[in-house]
Image (spheres, rainbow, N blue to C red):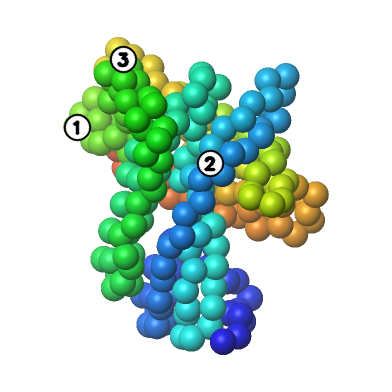
Amino acid sequence: MQPLAMNNPPKRVTDLIELKQRGEKITCRTDFEILPVDFSHGANPFQAYIFLCCYTGTIDGKEFTFRKCYSRGCPHNLCPHVSQAVMIANRYLQRDYRRLEECGIDIERRMFTLEDMIVKFNGYHEAHGPTLTIHDYINIAKEGNDVSVDITIEYVPAVEHFAHFENKQTFLMVDFTVTTLGRSGRYERCLACYPTGEEKEERRIAIGVANERLRLLYQEFDDASIIYKKCFFE
């Protein structure tokens, strides 16, 4: 089977949906990676785990593959807690499964698991309350509540640790600080990544993917009358 020959191979779940709607025959499966990653974040380098889903399959018999980062977690306050990250990743994964199924793409609903860490941190939720995603806040706004969001975007260099090698990546991260119902909450998303050092082509592609994801999210903000200021990667 030959690699997919097209000018713009799919980089997002949305791309697969659009191809299916145009009549392409698509098969799709998922594989997961939960990787320890060293992040270089200004004066505060730290290690976290990233929850990656690798989408692979065929489009009219030609292979495609792309990765999507669903969350990042660490056992300290520099990013969402690991046990939060597992739930956030699975909630967004379920949302993507539903979107794929609704357009007619068959896919097995497999989920992220991190059982040893869930057991280790099983008291965290009782101490810190429920985990909210950005779409929970959108629903709060749709119910008629005032919601405002401060948005910060940044490029975060990191090193992914695989079993026998390391991989330098730059992550395009978005930090949302949400104020509603008398409280503020912080939520972050990784919208794309590219190999560090391959600035000319891969960076441009990653920026395009991240900004398209932001545009879709901003449309949802507008539909829910959320107060915010648009920011894009450049």
Vertical side of 225 occupied by 26: above or below: below
Q: Which tag, 1 or 3, sits closer to the chain's start? A: 3
The quarter of the image holding the C terminus is top right
Return the residue nearer the eye: 127 or 157: 127
Residue 21 in the image: state x and y as whole percent: 36, 75
Q: Helix, strand, or loop for circle 1?
A: loop
- Report if residue 17 is visible in the image: yes
Which residue is tagged 1?
143
Return the residue nearer the eye: 86 or 21: 86
Residue 220 in the image: state x and y as whole percent: 36, 44
Q: CA distance from mark 1 to mark 3?
A: 27 Å
**The image quarter in which residue 121 lies:** top left
Q: Helix, strand, or loop for circle 3?
A: helix
- 89 horizontally vs 68: left or right: left
Return the residue nearer the eye: 43 or 75: 75
Query: Disc 1 or disc 3, which is closer to the eye?
Result: 3
- 214 horizontally vs 170: left or right: left
Q: CA distance from mark 1 to mark 2?
A: 32 Å
Image point 68% across, 25% down: which residue?
45
Q: Are marks 1 and 2 in contact (CB under 8 Å)?
A: no
Which amino acid does the dot numbered 2 rest on?
Ile
Answer few, some or many: residues within 10 Å of disc 1's Cα (few below 14, many 20 plus, some between 14 and 19). Answer: few
Which residue is tagged 2?
50
Image point 27% across, 18% down: which residue?
126
Image point 70% across, 30% down: which residue?
40
Residue at the limit of the structure toward the left, as seen here = 143
Which amino acid does the dot numbered 1 rest on?
Glu
Which residue is tagged 3?
127
Image point 55% across, 22% down: which residue?
78
- 228 horizontally vs 49: left or right: left
